[in-house]
Amino acid sequence: MSDDTATTPAPEDAPAEEAARDEVREAHLASITESLGDAVVASLVQPGRDLQVRVTTEAWPEAARTVRHRLGARYFCFLSAIDWMTSPFGRSMDAEVDRVLGAGDDEGADAEAAGETAADGDASGILQGVCGGDTRFQVFARVAHVGEPGHHWGITLRADVPEDTLAIGSWTGTYAGADWHEREAWEMFGISFLGHPGLRHLYLPSGFEGHPLRKDFPLLARHVKPWPGIVDVEPMPTDDGDGEGGDDSAGSDTGGAA
């Protein structure tokens, strides 16, 4: 009798498993999968937080129509791109204080070594994040359902951008707000959005060469002069003797000048 009791799972284990589920987001994922089928490449439900879905390149415009018209996610938050390549410049792109703090740290040393490896042309320096990926560049966008108290939720969608064309369908036909976001991604990453009404510069002059948000774009200002980072931030005033002395010193200088 006691042996049977010992091997029986505790009743409280079941509620713990249920708490780790998110039925609302799981239902949204099922609806997207039903609509797009095999075009859903990967997904991740983060209970109580988010739903991440990666679709094929070809299904990217259809994914926008699905989440807006089928799920009711009419609020467009943003659209952007990611360059998953490791910077070939290593830690030279970081602040001087980062190099100082990381000098005696094993993790910092590993990052330094990884940067040097990438600079030597190691093609394995690409590691995608949530839901994975097969290409260097990805586009991602977030939309949400708002307006009903207690029923706010959002979805983050992703898709790989083919490296041979660097082109993907536009969302502007479904979400008009994607217009400027796609222009920015085109300008900063060099990704073309097929069907966009007018890809043109937002920030850079028309003759500018290169795409500043690519990892292999050299920010010359950071190479000519070390990037200061937080070094230029002045210390906050304190209540100790040094802080009071500084105030007195300032007062005496003023008096002398008068």
Image (cartoon, helix red, strand yellow):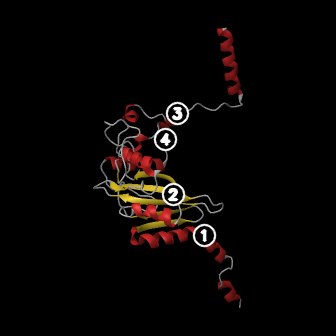
Distance Cα–Cα, label 4 vs label 1: 37 Å
Q: CA distance from mark 2 to mark 3?
A: 38 Å
| Residue at screen point 30% across, 48% down | 120
Rate crowding at label 2 as few (under 14), some (14 to 19) or many (20 or more) other CA atoms within 10 Å. Answer: many
Residue 121 coordinates in the image, percent (x, y):
30, 50
What amino acid type is highlighted by mark number 1? Ala
Of pointers 4 and 3, the one earlier in the residue sequence = 4
Disc marking residue 143: 2
**Disc 1/disc 3 C-alpha distance (Å):** 43 Å
> Residue under circle 4?
98
Amino acid type shown at disc 2: Val
Circle nearer the viewer, 2 or 3: 2
Rounded to the nearest angstrom, the CA distance separating label 1 from label 2 is: 24 Å
Q: Secondary structure at mark 1?
A: loop
Secondary-structure class at tag 4: helix
What is the crowding at mark 4: few (fewer than 14 residues within 10 Å), some, or many (at least 20)? some
Instruction: Give the labeled residue for mark 1.
Output: 20
4 and 2 marks in contact (CB < 8 Å):
no
Query: How far across and how far down the image is residue 151, in percent?
Result: 62, 63
| Label 3, residues with CA under 10 Å away: few <14, some 14-19, many ≥20 | few
| Residue on which disc 3 sits | 231
| Three-letter code for the amino acid on which mark 4 is drawn | Asp
Classify 195 as above or below 11: above
**Secondary structure of the residue carrying numbered label 3:** helix
Nearer-N-terminus badge (1/3): 1
Q: Is residue 9 above or below residue 164?
A: below
